[in-house]
Image: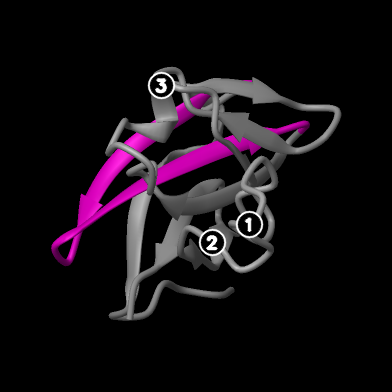
Amino acid sequence: METASDSQVKVCNVNELTPGQSKHIKAKDKDIGVFNVGGKFYAIDNMCIHAGAPLNEGFINEEKCQVACNWHGWIFDLPTGKCVSHPRQDVFAGTYVVKVLNDEIFVEVG
């Protein structure tokens, strides 16, 4: 049985974050948004790089696996953190590894 390491922070139980939902956590001085897209979990920096809006309060597009900031519509790809609506191709939010262990969701925060 796999167990969590010191760098892993528990988010919640799997049944507490259903598909299409998101959650904000604060871990090791980081604000992180955790998203359930079709049963797969993603974690990115929770602050929109444009104006600081909490991304976990944005609109989740499950088909494209993206979240749109609810303040100004900036769109982030959840697997990569890339801001796909920005004209430059090098604008990213930080991403984190998510693991599910024993029906619990963990985010690796080094």
Label 1 vs label 2: CA separation? 4 Å
Query: How many residues crowd mark 1 within 10 Å: few (<14), some (14–19), many (20+)?
Result: many
Local secondary structure at mark 1:
loop
Q: Which residue is mark 3?
A: 57
**Residue at position x 41%, y 42% in the image:** 33
Residue located at (42% from left, 30% from top): 56
Q: Is residue 71 visible?
A: yes
Circles 1, 2 touching at the beta carbon (< 8 Å): yes
Confirm whether the magenta stretch covers residue 21.
yes
Which residue occupies 38% across, 42% down? 50
Residue 14 higher or lower than 80, as above or below = above
Closer-to-camera residue (59/35): 59
Stretch of the chain drawn in magenta: 19-38
Magenta highlight on residue 95: no
Front-most of residues 50 and 59 = 50
- Where does residue 105 sit, x and y in percent of width and height? 49, 50
> Disc 1 marks which residue?
82
Q: CA distance from mark 3 to mark 1?
A: 18 Å
Name the residue type under label 3.
Glu
Disc number placed over residue 92 in the picture, else none: 2
Secondary structure state at the residue bearing disc 3: helix
Where 104 falls versus 20 (above or below)? below
Amino acid found under the numbered disc labelled 2: Phe
